[in-house]
Structures are given as C-alpha cells and as structure tokens.
Image (cartoon, rainbow, N blue to C red):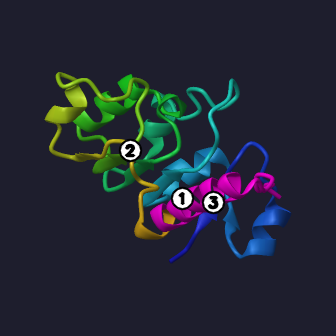
Amino acid sequence: MNVIAWSPNLTPERCKEVGVGYATKEELFASADIVTIHVVLSQRSRGLVGAADLARMKPTAYLVNTARGPIVDENALLEALTQKKIAGAGVDVFSVEPLPVDHPFRKLDNMVITPHLGYATEEVFRGHYAQMVEGIDGWLKGDAPRKLA
C-alpha cells in the first residue's frame, strides 16, 4: 500500500522518518483511494474537510471519519454521496450524536455508519476494566490513585 499523509502540522521530513509519503492537502484528496481522518477537533480543524476537498476525490474513493463529526462538512459529504461523486464513506462520528433517526445519512446505500464505537475492541475494554478494578482495589486499600504518565 502506498500511504501518503497531510496535516497542517506535518512536514515532509517527519513523513520520511515514519516511512510515508508527504502530500499537500489537495494532492491527498485528489490521489488517495481512501482518505481517513485522524485529527483532534479544534477551532482549526472544524470544517477542515469541505466541499472543495470532497470534489477533488476520485469517484472510486472513500472517506472514513472516526475522529470527530464537525471536522467534515456533513452537508458537503451528504451531497457528494447523494450525487455519487465519491464511492462511499464510513463514519463513526457526527455533529449530533446519537445520529437522529430521520437523518439523511441513514438512507444512503453508499455509507456505513456506526454509533461512535470505532474504538471499541476487546483489547480496549480489557484495559479499561482492568484499570477500573485496579483503581477500586487501590481505593479500598487506601492507596494513592494511579498517576498517568
């Protein structure tokens, strides 16, 4: 797989260090078969992926957003999917959660939606519950709470 990346804070040097190709935002959307979103939601990233970006995507390309809903302009995504300008999308996060029952995304045949559970794996849950038990046990014994690094 040829992996390329873009971020407002990413440099070509950092991409080289981790073995991925650097692309401008425009190049990424124009050439990627699958665009996945991995940025935190902030004032800078709100609406980061808009209509112009989706218009650059190939008609065979897919968008995956498991970061935060407002990073992608949902109206622009709905239009791109409805008009089949891109092949599809996989979305786990939305501007309004839970996604309303009557939301147009629910009617699309080229979109996979999940209820903000992309992080939910057996390993994650085992870790969460082990930490909870450790915390309760420590509290019962009068130990100090665990410090995060």
Quadrant assignment, res 4: bottom right
Decide: few, some or many residues near mark 2? Use Cα within 10 Å; few <14, some 14-19, many ≥20: many
CA–CA distance in space, label 2 to label 1:
20 Å
Amino acid type indicated by mark 1: His
The answer to whether the residue labelled 2 contacts the one labelled 3, judged by CB atoms less than 8 Å apart, is no
Please say whether residue 136 is one of the residues in the magenta stretch: yes
Q: Position of residue 36 (x, y in %)?
A: 50, 53
Helix, strand or loop at mark 1: helix
Label at residue 137: 3
Image position of 123 (left or right of 77): right
Q: Position of residue 95 (x, y in %)?
A: 43, 25
Amino acid type indicated by mark 3: Asp
CA–CA distance in space, label 2 to label 3:
34 Å
Q: Is residue 9 above or below residue 80?
A: below
Image: magenta residue range: 125-149
Pick whichever of labels 1 and 3 is earlier in the sequence: 1
User: Which residue is drawn at the image coordinates 25% and 23% (left, top)?
Assistant: 100
Q: Nearer the viewer, mark 2 or mark 1?
A: 1
Image position of 11 (left or right of 28): right
Q: Nearer the viewer, residue 78 or 61?
A: 78
User: Which residue is drawn at the image coordinates 51% and 28% (left, top)?
Assistant: 70
The quadrant of the rendering that contains the C terminus is bottom right
Q: Nearer the viewer, residue 99 or 142?
A: 142
Outermost residue on the front side: it is 141
